[in-house]
Image (tube, rainbow, N blue to C red):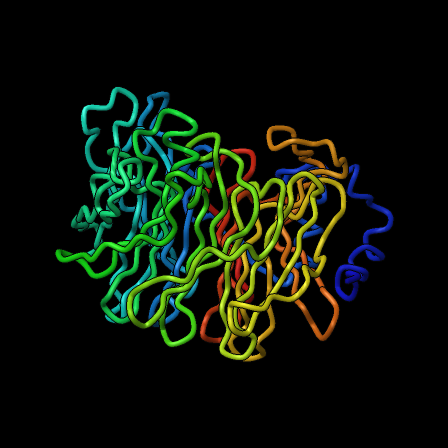
């Protein structure tokens, strides 16, 4: 599909100030502010003290409260604070520290039907490991502001007993978790990395599991077992509450480490009897970067946005039933871009929207070498049969997460590429 509309208008309006000459950072010496004046989004800084490009997650709760969970390095130490804040009608709360960890492996946040936030992450104890100082699946429940109660659903690889020696052996559970709620019931998907050390034994043999229930009573489910197949399941997980208010997820295959590059996009959904469908390869992808993003809409069904980092090609594919999927639809492919996609549906118009990062005009740019003169954060929407994209932040945006408010307005939370500060952009 071609890109047009607002993007074309912006290009014409800025014909005298080419992107290749635009420095980043929004100072008076550059035209970042001028570019942002043409964006339909307004931007604010949620936490300027946050440091490093580490994972973040968002969820929209009752009353359009936006919850944000994210990590920040503590000074020059090896410690990372897991923080949480809420944004509501233009105001952000003070960051709350949920936990302090030394091993960062993803984060996810969700609200239950009572409007209480819960954050899932890798925490707990080391189980005598000399490297994995945290090795358990943790779900932290928020009470009053600043008050968090940590629960640990899983501590060992035999949490979901299979009878397979490899699948049931190990201590490293809770990698790259994803959490959703149906009412007060939580579903938490996570990667079981066994002993977190060796390729074939641990990473290629990793399993994808789910804990459901909470906060004090949990039921284990094995979702995808690698074991003797050496499939490396559960590398990067994206989960939604889908048809019948049952969870569905996508994950990729990671065989080289805890959070190494993955390949392929695999889809699974929970059935009413508690079992899960077998992994279905939705798309062949050589390098999924930080993984695919899954969305669900009552009319469209399930949809996936993913970038193939080897070609910098961002694509979209959809399925009404989770079985038959459309051919991948090209959304963006220019220079080094389409990165870190986040998919969400307009609840009224049922149109897919994808936030993504443009790093450089050069296809050879890597994640450590983005061009601060041209990097941008954008959102593309499928309007009719064409993808139309708009500028969110001309200063760029790493690891963005996109959601819709009940008003139909889009909200994006992301990290400043140069500092790691946490920012929010919303349509007025």
Farthest residue, direction left: 216
356 or 30, nearer to the observer: 356
Task: Name the spot of residue 226 as percent of width and height, x first.
Answer: 40, 43
Q: Is residue 249 left or right of residue 428?
A: left
The residue sitting at 67% across, 52% down in the picture is: 314
Identify the residue shown where x is 33% and y is 32%: 80
Q: In the figure, 350 relative to 179: above or below?
A: below
Quadrant where the N terminus lies?
Answer: bottom right
Q: Is 420 located above or below residue 40 in the figure? A: above
- Residue under the image location 57 percent in, 69 percent down: 319
Place of residue 132 in the rendered image (x, y in percent of width and height, measured from the top left): 29, 27
The residue sitting at 30% across, 22% down in the picture is: 131
- In the picture, residue 385 is in which quadrant? bottom right
Residue 20 shows up from this direction: yes
Task: Estimate the x, y position of residue 9 in percent, counting from the top left.
Answer: 80, 62
Of 300 and 196, nearer the camera is 196
Specify whether 322 is left or right of 127: right
Using the rendered view, name the quadrant where residue 375 is placed: top right
Question: Which of 120/373 is in front?
Answer: 120
305 relative position to 220: left or right: right
Residue 183 percent coordinates (x, y): 26, 71
């Amino acid at each position: 599909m071609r890109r047009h509309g607002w993007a074309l208008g912006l290009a014409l309006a800025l014909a005298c100030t080419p992107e290749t000459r635009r420095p980043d950072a929004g100072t008076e010496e550059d035209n970042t502010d001028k570019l942002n004046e043409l964006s339909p989004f307004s931007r604010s800084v949620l936490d300027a003290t946050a440091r490093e490009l580490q994972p973040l997650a968002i969820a929209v709760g009752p009353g359009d409260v936006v919850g944000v969970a994210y990590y920040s390095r503590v000074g020059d130490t090896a410690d990372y604070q897991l923080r949480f804040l809420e944004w509501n009608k233009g105001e952000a709360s003070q960051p709350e520290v949920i936990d302090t960890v030394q091993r960062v492996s993803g984060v996810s946040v969700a609200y239950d039907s009572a409007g209480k936030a819960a954050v899932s992450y890798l925490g707990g104890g080391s189980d005598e490991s000399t490297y994995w100082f945290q090795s358990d699946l943790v779900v932290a429940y928020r009470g009053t502001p600043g008050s968090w109660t940590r629960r640990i659903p899983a501590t060992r690889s035999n949490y979901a007993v299979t009878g397979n020696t490899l699948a049931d052996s190990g201590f490293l559970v809770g990698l790259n978790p994803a959490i959703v709620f149906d009412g007060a019931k939580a579903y938490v998907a996570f990667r079981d990395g066994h002993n977190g050390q060796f390729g074939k034994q641990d990473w290629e043999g990793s399993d994808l599991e789910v804990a459901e229930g909470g906060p004090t009573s949990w039921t284990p489910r094995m979702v995808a077992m690698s074991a003797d197949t050496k499939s490396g399941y559960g590398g990067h997980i994206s989960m939604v509450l889908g048809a019948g208010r049952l969870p569905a997820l996508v994950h990729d295959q990671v065989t080289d480490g805890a959070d190494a590059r993955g390949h392929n996009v695999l889809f699974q959904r929970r059935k009413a009897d508690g079992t899960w469908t077998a992994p279905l390869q939705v798309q062949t992808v050589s390098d999924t970067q930080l993984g695919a993003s899954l969305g669900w809409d009552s009319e469209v069904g399930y949809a996936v946005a993913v970038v193939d980092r080897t070609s910098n090609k961002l694509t979209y594919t959809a399925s009404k039933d989770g079985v038959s999927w459309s051919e991948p639809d090209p959304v963006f492919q220019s220079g080094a871009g389409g990165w870190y996609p986040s998919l969400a549906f307009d609840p009224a118009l049922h149109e897919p929207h994808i936030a993504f990062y443009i790093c450089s005009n050069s296809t050879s740019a890597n994640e450590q070498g983005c061009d601060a003169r041209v990097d941008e954060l954008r959102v593309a929407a499928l309007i009719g049969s064409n993808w139309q994209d708009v500028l969110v932040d001309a200063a760029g945006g790493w690891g963005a997460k996109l959601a819709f408010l009940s008003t139909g307005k889009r909200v994006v939370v992301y990290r400043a590429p140069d500092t790691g500060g946490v920012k929010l952009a919303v349509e007025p």
